[in-house]
Amino acid sequence: MADSLRIGIAGLGTVGSSLVRIIQQRSNELAITCGRAIEIIAVSARDRSRDRGIDLTGITWFDTPEQMAAEAEIDVFVELVGGASGPAKAAVRTALARGLHVVTANKALLAKHGVELATTAEEKGVLLNFEAAVAGGIPVIKALRESLTGNHVTRIYGIMNGTCNYILTKMEKEGLSFETCLKEAQRLGYAEADPAFDIEGNDTAHKLAILTTLAFGNKIAADDIYLEGITNISIEDIHAAADLGYRIKLLGVAQMTESGIEQRVHPTMVPLDSVIAQVDGVTNAVAIESDILGELLMVGPGAGGNATASAVLGDIADIAKSRPGIQQVPVLGRPAKSLEKYRRAKMKKHEGGYFIRLTVADRAGVFASIATSMAENGISLESIVQRSRAQTPDAPQTIVLVTHATMEDAVRKAVASIKSQAYLTDEPQVIRIERTKAA
């Protein structure tokens, strides 16, 4: 049997502690499967005195990730610290420069510095693995980087944030407000005390940017994504969607078009009878559309100590099984130096149409004015429904429009025209509708 693979783990939070526990409990099984033992040599975390329920006897402790990356006698540096800069970035750079393999679950770091880090790893001839950075325990990185070789991916989309999916699921099933569901998510530990990164769509955007690069061979463009979170989704939208045969999900979508790549994150209405509409709670789902395989949908736990640790361990096992002198899979699917410049797609027709909710004053001529604004912008309506908010005279009324396939720009212009008429009593709500096999 080959010499043991020596690893150092930076970050002993929920994921790091789970990883230590799993490796220690299954050391014999891992040695047989990988052809060599996996040995934890070093760890780094902020608080030495904290009881994490794991045995760190005989393991060298470093006070900072940077120190461990620079000094520890290890083969693999495992980064579970988090953050796009600071200690995580410095430590990963140091480890790669030393010629160490790196495993990370840090999507923010990769979204901002992934191409640079991939270039260094390839120059040093080491692996940079990051399965846990996107969709937790779902092996979507391996699928794109290895399993779908030869396929031309045309579209990738999915539910990539468990916090948002939990909130939207709870709103629908229990009829609760966004604010109430967010507080419950925070109580259960699904959402942070400051949840903005999740609920505003940034977390999904980072993951989508990484998947886009793997799918289409472009440089990572996390700052070039249309971004819209779920904070404006109301229980009224949830009910209206259900009445129309849809369910609202926060989707990340990337697709190749003739004019370039389209990347967007936003609330989306998906048909109730679609597979992705059935993905509830903190579960994630990622769909990949390609020319040879067709559509592949992967569903599984997107977060949590064991799910994420499982993905990290899979990356470590891949390194343990690798052998010197054998050509490695490029970090981002193709050599970093051959990644193409990102080309943003021109505005195109959205084939699924749009849901538009308007809260208007109850007075004559409103319906006609709305219809005129739509017609003037070339928008064909599939349906228009008035939903009464209250039985009292002169109470505001809700009008729900569903359009046929149309241009995003046309919808925005029509809504702006309606707003200028001064009969709206609340901000309009616009949600895209997706109609595909899985969505």
Image (cartoon, rainbow, N blue to C red):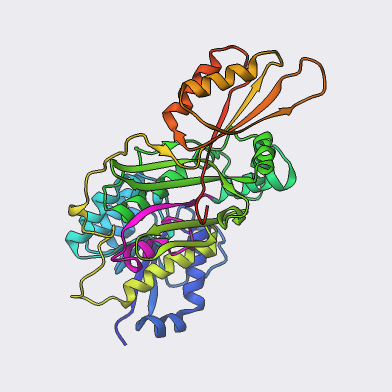
Residue at the limit of the structure toward the right, as seen here? 392
Q: Position of residue 227 (x, y in %)?
A: 44, 36
Write the residue at 42% across / 41% down: 264
Circle count: 0
| Residue 425 in view of the camera | no
Quadrant the N terminus occupies: bottom left
**Residue 144 forms part of the magenta stretch:** yes
| Residue 330 in view of the camera | yes
Q: Quadrant of residue 104?
A: bottom left
Write the residue at 49% across / 35% down: 228
Depth check: give the residue in front, 133 or 40.
133
Q: Position of residue 335 (x, y in %)?
A: 21, 58
Write the residue at 35% across / 61% down: 144
Residue at the limit of the structure toward the bottom, as seen here? 1
Q: Quadrant of residue 226?
A: top left
Chain part drawn in magenta: 133-161
Depth check: give the residue in front, 220 or 267.
267
Q: Position of residue 385 (x, y in %)?
A: 67, 31
**184 sits to left or right of 165:** right
Depth check: give the residue in front, 391 or 167.
391
Write the residue at 53% across / 13% down: 420
**382 sits to left or right of 44:** right
Q: Position of residue 248 (x, y in %)?
A: 59, 44
**285 sits to left or right of 153:** right
Residue 406 versus residue 48 in the image, above or below = above
